[in-house]
Amino acid sequence: MPRGAGFAAAIGVQDRAAPLVDAPGLHAADVAEAGLRTRIAALIARRNRTGEWLAEQMARVRQDLQLTQVAQRRVAQVAPAYGQGETTKRPQLCAVG
């Protein structure tokens, strides 16, 4: 699985789980037990941090992909000048003698 595919799946799960996390958060002020309010606030804060982290990771993966694509285009432009175009296949090891 490509590195970025896991992040996309994680964001999808987080999006689908959002109503389950948001519903208690909407009513946290009405909860009488302070400990439960604290746990709800911690859950929402953790989900927000996770969402930010996932967004950062996705941006990093996209940037890596863009750099890889730029490098591939550069190699495709320069390789024919060195006789190693896409159609030329040379053996990895060649014994002479």
Image (cartoon, rainbow, N blue to C red):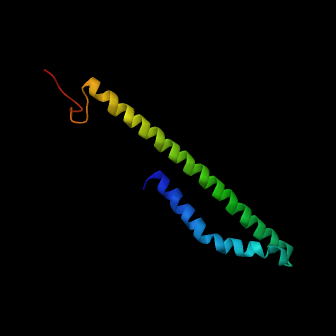
**Where the N terminus falls, by quadrant?**
bottom left
Q: Nearer the viewer, residue 76 or 34?
A: 76
Q: Residue at x 51, y 47 (%)?
A: 62
Measured as percent of width and height from the top left, residue 72 is found at 38, 37
Residue located farthest toward the left when viewing the structure as drawn: 97
* Total numbered circles: 0
Relative side of 96 to 7, left or right: left
Relative side of 14 to 30, left or right: left
Q: Residue at x 70, y 61 (%)?
A: 46
Q: Residue at x 49, y 53 (%)?
A: 4
Relative side of 88 to 42, left or right: left
Q: In this picture, is 32 found above or below 86? A: below
Measured as percent of width and height from the top left, residue 64 is found at 50, 42
Measured as percent of width and height from the top left, residue 18 is found at 64, 70
Residue 12: quadrant of the picture: bottom right
Q: In this picture, is 54 found above or below 63? A: below
Q: Nearer the viewer, residue 95 or 52?
A: 52
Residue 97: quadrant of the picture: top left
Residue located farthest toward the top when viewing the structure as drawn: 97
Q: In this picture, is 22 found above or below 55? A: below
Relative side of 18 to 86, left or right: right
Measured as percent of width and height from the top left, residue 95 is found at 17, 26
Q: In this picture, is 35 found above or below 9? A: below
Q: Residue at x 65, y 54 (%)?
A: 52
